[in-house]
Image (cartoon, rainbow, N blue to C red):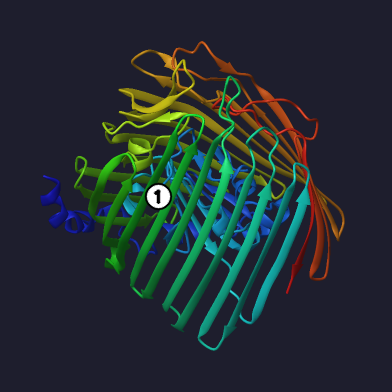
């Protein structure tokens, strides 16, 4: 059936809808951009959130996780990001994927991008699978980097307690039609507990050749090497568990309007050892893919974006036979606007043929209405998530492999409202309901060793609230609140590691031009650590502080996390960092 749909998919989506026969319109993403850019630097379009370079600069964030944790419903770490409790999120930088192929949930290689390199971030909460493929049930994050006309770059370094040190430099230059850049960095820490040290190196290069507007070619290459200890659960420590990873990313992107092509190759190596348990396991994964799309005018009906994609995954390891899997896809989406552009309808469909799993259809529908400073959106999407090689075959001191894992399917429903009441006050409210069939989750056994397993049916139901208030030019307050019920419908038990309440409150203060201060506060309610709901990680409240003094091309900064040195635990039961500080400098060319 799906193979037949691959033939007629584009034809199905070109059919017009009479009520939108007013005008020729841009694509949905372009329409959203024209709306959001006229409002505040961080804006919400229902299930889509846009963050600009201006807002990122005000945050004084040194890592991408610090930027994303300001977004309602989003939880980010040093190598992860989740949306409404779901960590299957795809992240793209200038069109190329930066998910780690050797990880469990598609961990993010945040080291490839720094906040001050970002021009724009688009966060598609609970949607994006119809365009960007499988393994995006949480959503999709699109990052666009800054472009330079001459010579730009920066050198950043900082040091702190727990033996923390960091250094990073990048340089970008444009001459004529060519733009080239290089980057490199190093990070190390002794950690705050036994076997918690980390050392990471990275290097990268890029080149762009621009013919004219809408016609360009770009190439990028990046390498990351990481070595760290894994301390384990407090009740089940692993003082001799070590992990080494290597990641290489290559991409080539060509745009010749209306056609865009992205070819990418990601390769990763994961080596786990524990001499006390006789563990010495290696996992190697490579992903090669091609995404080809084009945008066509459909006359009075708007625009159609359609294309195809191919991805081949290979894996080898010390405890399983070599594996190879392929996915073939066709996709199309039509965006229609009417009622003087106040009403928009987007309908999309993606058909996937998987060599190792069931074939899948990923539909997506969104209806939006805007009036003056109000915008309402209702959306539905379906995503299919394939279990990673890591989840199926990797073995460590705390994880057993499970080759029998199957694909999970997520049906996402959302209703959102954004309003800007005054120039100084704006807010948004959204509700969501996600149904995951055969959901893949990590379950820890009584012996402290866990395994990834499929559950029959789980649901995530809740809502987000966000508000921004600017009482004065020198001060701004932002707050977000997320309520979520995460339930295993077969047992009626709460899902592990999922908090019911999450609250953020950030205060931005700039008393004089060179000085800016950010006070961050976060509350997370208790979570269950096992499927029987008999073990919990307690609630916690954290306060952090960032300050920066900037003059001309030079700035000094400091950042404090866990200001009051509270003892708390991550959702998986691991001990979280105590009072942590860094002091550093940044020099911009």
For mark 1, what is the residue?
101
Q: Position of residue 243 (x, y in %)?
A: 51, 43
Q: Residue at x 38, y 40 (%)?
A: 390
Question: Which one is in front, 180 or 149?
Answer: 180
- Which quadrant would the N terminus be assigned to in this image? top left
Q: Choose top left, top right, bottom left or bottom right for residue 233.
A: top right
Question: Which one is in front, 208 or 162?
Answer: 162
SS assignment at label 1? loop
Count the labels in the image. 1
Answer left or right for 247 relative to 473: left
Q: Residue at x 49, y 50 (%)?
A: 245
Asked if residue 178 is positioned above or below residue 47 in the image, the reply reads below
Asked if residue 333 is positioned above or below residue 535 in the image, the reply reads below
Q: Position of residue 284 (x, y in %)?
A: 37, 50
Q: Can residue 24 be seen at all in this image of the molecule? A: no
Q: Residue furthest right?
A: 512
């Amino acid at each position: 059936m799906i193979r037949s749909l691959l033939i007629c998919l584009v034809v199905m989506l070109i059919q017009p809808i009479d009520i939108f026969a007013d005008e020729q319109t841009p694509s949905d993403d372009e329409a959203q951009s024209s709306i959001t850019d006229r409002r505040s630097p961080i804006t919400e379009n229902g299930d889509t959130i846009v963050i600009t370079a201006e807002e990122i600069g005000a945050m004084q964030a040194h890592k991408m996780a610090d930027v994303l944790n300001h977004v309602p419903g989003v939880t980010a770490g040093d190598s992860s990001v989740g949306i409404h409790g779901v960590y299957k999120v795809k992240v793209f930088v200038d069109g190329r994927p930066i998910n780690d192929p050797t990880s469990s949930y598609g961990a993010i290689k945040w080291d490839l991008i720094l906040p001050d390199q970002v021009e724009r971030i688009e966060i598609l909460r609970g949607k994006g699978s119809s365009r960007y493929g499988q393994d995006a049930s949480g959503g999709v994050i699109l990052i666009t980097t800054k472009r330079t006309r001459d010579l730009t770059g920066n050198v950043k370094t900082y040091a702190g307690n727990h033996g923390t040190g960091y250094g990073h430099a990048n340089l970008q230059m444009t001459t004529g039609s060519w733009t080239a850049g290089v980057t490199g960095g190093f990070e190390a820490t002794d950690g705050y507990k036994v076997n918690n040290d980390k050392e990471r190196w990275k290097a990268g290069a890029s080149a762009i050749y621009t013919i004219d507007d809408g016609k360009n070619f770009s190439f990028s290459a990046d390498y990351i090497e990481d070595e760290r200890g894994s301390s384990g659960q407090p009740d089940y420590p692993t003082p001799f568990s070590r992990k080494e990873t290597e990641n290489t990313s290559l991409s080539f992107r060509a745009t010749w309007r209306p056609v865009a092509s992205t070819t990418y190759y990601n390769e990763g190596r994961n080596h786990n050892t524990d001499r006390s348990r006789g563990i010495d396991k290696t996992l190697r994964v490579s992903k090669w893919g091609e995404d080809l799309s084009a945008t066509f005018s459909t006359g009075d009906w708007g625009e159609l974006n359609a294309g195809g994609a191919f991805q081949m995954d290979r894996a080898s390891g010390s405890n399983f036979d070599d594996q190879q899997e392929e996915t073939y896809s066709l996709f199309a989406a039509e965006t229609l606007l009417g009622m003087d552009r106040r009403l928009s309808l987007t309908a999309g469909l993606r058909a996937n043929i998987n060599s190792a799993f069931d074939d899948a259809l990923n539909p997506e529908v969104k209806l939006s209405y805007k009036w003056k400073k109000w915008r309402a959106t209702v959306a539905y999407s379906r995503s299919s998530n394939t279990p990673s090689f890591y989840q199926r075959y990797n073995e460590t001191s705390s994880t057993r492999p499970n080759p029998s894992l199957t694909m999970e399917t997520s049906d996402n429903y959302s209703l959102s409202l954004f309003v800007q009441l005054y120039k100084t006050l704006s807010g948004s409210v959204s509700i969501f309901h996600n149904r995951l069939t055969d959901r893949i989750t990590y379950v820890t056994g009584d012996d402290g060793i866990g395994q990834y397993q499929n559950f029959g049916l789980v649901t995530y139901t809740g809502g987000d609230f966000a508000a921004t208030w600017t009482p004065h030019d020198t001060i701004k307050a932002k707050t977000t609140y997320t309520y979520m019920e995460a339930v295993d419908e077969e047992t009626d038990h709460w899902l592990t590691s999922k908090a019911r309440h999450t609250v953020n409150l950030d205060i931005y203060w700039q008393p004089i031009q060179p000085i800016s201060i950010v006070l961050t506060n976060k509350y997370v309610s208790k979570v269950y650590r096992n499927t029987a709901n008999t073990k919990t990680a307690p609630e916690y409240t954290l306060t952090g502080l960032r300050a920066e003094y900037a003059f001309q091309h030079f700035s000094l900064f400091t950042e404090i996390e866990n200001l009051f040195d509270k003892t708390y635990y991550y959702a998986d039961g691991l001990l979280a960092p105590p009072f942590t500080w860094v002091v550093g400098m940044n020099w911009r060319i």
